[in-house]
Image (tube, rainbow, N blue to C red):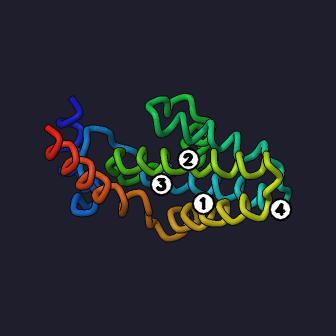
Amino acid sequence: MGIKLINRAMDNGQFASFDQCPIDQTLVSENGIRVGAALISVATIGFVVTGWFGIPIALAVDFYLRGFGHAKLSPVRWIASKLAKSGRLVNGAPKRFAATIGFLMSLIISALASFHWLAAAKGVAGILLFCALLEALANVCIGCQIYPIWLRLTSKHSQSNG
């Protein structure tokens, strides 16, 4: 079923370029991803302005849901799906990978904030904000750039140990 969906999307010209990311059977809305990144940006700015560590905790929960197979439960995904126009479908694997990176960054921000190391927490939040704004405003996914490298590194590692 997934391959048929990919083929149909390719035939309709809805699928983004395959050269940038390895393909899996999950397709996601490019517009939905960009709106979600805008929402993450707003929340991250909220943390930078207020320093309230509940924000990165909420972001970590949402990134966890999207990165580890529970995207249907994600509030950011739900809101983004209501706000975004339908559009081109893109490979979901790099977006999940990016969500796992967002999860780790949000955990780091939360930990730093809980130890009252707000300058460091806001520094990491600045990196998260930069990545989210790149996705939202310029359609540049840092996860899509890192994901193929990650796959090459992990597949070489698993091949040499196997």
- The residue carrying mark 3 is 31
The image quadrant that residue 82 belongs to is top right
Query: Do the residues under discs 2 and 1 have CB atoms within 8 angstroms?
Result: no
Q: Residue, x 68% and y 52% (percent of image)? A: 109
Question: How many numbered marks appear?
Answer: 4
Q: Residue, x 70% and y 40% (percent of image)? A: 58
Q: Which amino acid type is marked by label 3?
A: Asn
Q: Which mark, by number, is residue 49?
A: 4
The image quadrant where one finds the C terminus is top left
Can you tell which of label 3 and label 2 is closer to the viewer?
Answer: 2
Q: Which amino acid type is marked by label 1?
A: Leu
Of marks 2 and 4, which one's residue comes earlier in the chain?
A: 4
Q: Residues within 10 Å of mark 1 (few under 14, many from 20)?
A: many
Residue 77 is situated, as x and y percent measured from the top left of the image, at 55, 40
The secondary structure type at the circle numbered 3 is helix
Of marks 3 and 2, which one's residue comes earlier in the chain?
A: 3
Q: Residues within 10 Å of mark 4 (few under 14, many from 20)?
A: few
- The residue carrying mark 2 is 104
Would residue 74 appear left or right of 13 to someone viewing this image? right
Q: Residues within 10 Å of mark 3 (few under 14, many from 20)?
A: many
Of marks 1 and 3, which one's residue comes earlier in the chain?
A: 3
